[in-house]
């Protein structure tokens, strides 16, 4: 059914909204919005609670009759800060904080309102407070008779409802009071009350918030995600509604509601059979769509944000890619990894969107609201629509992307492995990976001795053999790798990214990481063939640089084929985590141990940003504690014995 022929959805239902479960409040702006699909969505709640009951968790006797429906109620919070910003932009325009409400031509009467503050009243209404300065009197020639001046604040209590334009949220003053500087309502001039009612009330009520982008993007996502289930798509679009908002402590809660057909039979869970080739191909398409979307979305969001927020967005992307790496290393597809990846990343991303909205204008705030709501809706659909074939795939992700940038196209969301200078810039890295050795100014550009080993494809065969550890030449091999790592370290120190006081730690860190990750190997020999060392998770070469985590940041083919490039890439990642994480987050000051920086850096290198302190946390699982303990032993051994310590890899 085309958009032109489907029935128009019921845009607004005025009256009592469907019941919804309570959810966390009182956190950052939009906090309930940010986590509603992750921690407290009705669709994720236990069936005994009011609100939405997931189809796959219904009681066996519920909804088996023909035509049974599953109502979905998605709470969305419009933070009071957004309304406050709208007031500032449309009323308080003189200096960003004040508005001259009255200025008589005779200069005798003046009323100035300033500093709008919006929050929740105790009774569920919205409260707007304004500072007021007024002076007045009766003009007589050049004089003002019976003059008065007054300073204080006006407090307005408002209710919110959708107006004649279905998506336009309008506000009506239902009560007001004036308080002087001492907080009392006595002695207020009568004429001032008249000014407030006749001039201030209408000015404040003229400000509205249009949620058309939110409705548009939600409908588009429903239309796209339910395309394979025409009856469900029609039911959802026809029943779609934004319900009259309810005042909450952190904002106005608006219920986005629609109906889906309920599952007619309960199916007992069965063990998942091994994935078929078709299922594996579908899984690959879905994870690539998710990876491409997450990368595009975070790059887009970070483009114009201040450094602190940009770093937090980058960290979210880094961890999302580490989580993808772990999902790809799994031996089973019994669960839905893409859904888990999406939900986990969305849980970290949504609060950052709130932070981004804090510093933007109303248009930016509402655009992020629409984007976040669409993401929450996608999670809800995936949660309750399994019996309809709903999945988080490229179609839903593309619709979600268009909630953020309307003109995004397939090319923007395509998954590829090419170097991406924009992505490297997000990570604070130069446009291309740095050369291992940089000639001194004025010197001839002479390739290093390890670059000389691989001047052609023919010589590459011999080079691979030269970088293969063998028992009879092990001493020479370890010396060769140690020299290579030494050149990488020297080039890095020439760039001066690591402060001098941390360099002894940094030097041991690089060598110990290469030992921990690969036993100082770029290649292995199997069945008479020399191949790059690669893990099941897609980590490759000397430094085990993961091709999924670092897609777009490094040349994936060179990581496998060029040991010097691999060493340089692994070094660059370690420096990033040492400087931008361990040192920046003051891990050495927290522990009182300078060498804790090496342990923290390796933990992030191994597991992603949220693993920074795992080596010292009591609740870290045993397998990770074992990894961190092994690294620490290697780090200490490198400090004591240098390259000779790595011989332990080849003992026996």
Image (cartoon, rainbow, N blue to C red):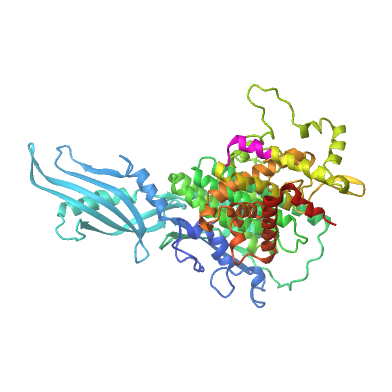
Is residue 459 rendered to the left or right of residue 257? right
Does 153 lie within the magenta span?
A: no
Residue 48 picture location, percent across and down: 57, 75
Is residue 628 rendered to the left or right of residue 16? right
Query: Quick one: which residue is furthest to the right in this view?
Result: 528
Residue 207 picture location, percent across and down: 37, 48
Image quadrant where one finds the C terminus: bottom right
Say which residue appears at 33% left-offset and 44% top-offset. 91
Q: Out of 185 and 645, give the one closest to the viewer.
A: 645
Is residue 505 shown above or below 253?
above
Q: Out of 49 and 485, give the one closest to the viewer.
A: 485
Q: Out of 62 and 253, give the one closest to the viewer.
A: 253
Residue 616 picture location, percent across and down: 59, 62
Say which residue appears at 30% left-offset and 50% top-offset. 202
Predominant secondary structure, magenta span: helix
Does residue 76 appear anywhere in the picture?
no
Does 496 lie within the magenta span?
A: yes
Does residue 196 appear anywhere in the picture?
yes
Question: Magenta residues, as a range?
Answer: 488-499
Residue 591 picture location, percent across and down: 53, 58
Q: Out of 160 and 280, give the one closest to the viewer.
A: 280
């Amino acid at each position: 059914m085309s958009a032109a022929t489907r029935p128009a959805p019921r845009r607004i239902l005025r009256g009592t909204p469907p019941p919804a479960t309570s959810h966390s409040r009182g956190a950052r702006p939009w906090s309930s919005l940010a986590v509603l699909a992750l921690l407290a969505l009705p669709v994720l709640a236990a069936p005994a609670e009011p609100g939405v009951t997931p189809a796959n968790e219904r009681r066996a006797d519920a909804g088996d009759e023909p035509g049974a429906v599953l109502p979905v109620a998605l709470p969305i919070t419009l933070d009071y800060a957004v309304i406050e910003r709208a007031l500032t932009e449309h009323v308080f325009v003189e200096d960003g904080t004040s508005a001259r409400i009255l200025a008589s031509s005779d200069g005798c009467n003046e009323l100035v309102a300033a500093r709008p503050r919006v929050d929740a009243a105790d009774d569920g209404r919205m409260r707007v407070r304004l500072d007021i300065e007024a002076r007045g009197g009766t003009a007589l020639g050049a004089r003002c008779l019976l003059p008065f001046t007054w300073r204080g604040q006006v407090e307005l209590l408002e209710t919110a409802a959708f107006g004649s334009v279905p998506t336009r949220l309008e506000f009506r003053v239902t009560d007001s009071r004036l308080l002087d500087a001492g907080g009392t309502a006595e002695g207020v001039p009568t004429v001032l009350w008249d000014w407030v009612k006749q001039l201030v009330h209408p000015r404040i009520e003229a400000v509205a918030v249009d949620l058309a982008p939110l409705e548009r993007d939600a409908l588009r996502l429903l239309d796209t995600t339910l395309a394979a289930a025409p009856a469900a798509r029609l039911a959802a679009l026809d029943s779609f509604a934004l319900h009259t908002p309810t005042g909450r402590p952190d904002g106005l809660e608006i219920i986005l509601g629609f109906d889906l057909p309920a599952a007619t039979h309960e199916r007992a869970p069965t063990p998942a059979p091994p994935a078929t080739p078709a299922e594996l191909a579908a899984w690959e398409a879905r994870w690539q769509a998710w990876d491409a979307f997450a990368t595009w979305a975070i790059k887009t969001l970070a483009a114009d944000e201040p450094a602190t927020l940009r770093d937090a967005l980058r960290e979210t992307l880094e961890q999302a890619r580490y989580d993808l790496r772990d999902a790809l290393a799994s031996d089973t597809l019994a669960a839905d990894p893409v859904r888990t990846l999406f939900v986990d990343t969305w849980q970290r991303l949504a609060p950052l969107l709130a932070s981004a909205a804090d510093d933007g204008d109303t248009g930016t705030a509402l655009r992020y609201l629409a984007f976040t709501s669409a993401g929450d809706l996608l999670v809800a659909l995936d949660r309750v629509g399994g019996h309809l074939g709903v999945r988080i795939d490229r179609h839903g992700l593309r619709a979600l992307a268009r909630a953020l940038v309307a003109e995004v196209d397939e090319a923007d969301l395509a998954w590829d492995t090419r170097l991406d200078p924009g992505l490297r810039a997000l990570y604070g890295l130069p446009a291309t990976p740095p050369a291992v050795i940089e000639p001194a100014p004025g010197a001839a550009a002479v390739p290093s001795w390890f670059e000389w080993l691989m001047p052609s494809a023919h010589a590459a065969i011999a080079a691979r053999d030269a970088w293969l550890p063998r028992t009879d030449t092990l001493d020479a091999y370890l010396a060769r790798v140690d020299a290579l790592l030494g050149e990488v370290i020297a080039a890095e120190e020439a760039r001066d990214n690591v402060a001098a006081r941390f360099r002894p730690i940094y030097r041991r860190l690089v060598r110990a990481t290469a030992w921990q990750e690969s036993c100082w190997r770029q290649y292995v020999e199997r069945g008479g063939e020399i191949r790059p060392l690669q893990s099941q998770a897609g980590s490759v070469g000397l430094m085990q640089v993961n091709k999924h985590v670092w897609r777009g940041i490094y040349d994936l083919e060179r990581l496998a084929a060029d040991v010097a490039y691999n060493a340089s890439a692994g070094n660059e990642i370690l420096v990033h985590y040492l400087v931008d994480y361990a040192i920046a987050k003051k891990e050495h000051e927290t522990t009182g141990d300078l060498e804790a920086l090496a342990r923290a850096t390796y933990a992030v290198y191994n597991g992603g940003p949220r693993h920074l302190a795992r080596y010292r946390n009591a609740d870290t699982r045993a397998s990770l504690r074992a990894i961190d303990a092994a690294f620490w032993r290697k780090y200490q051994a490198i400090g004591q014995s240098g390259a000779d310590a790595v011989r332990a890899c080849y003992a026996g």
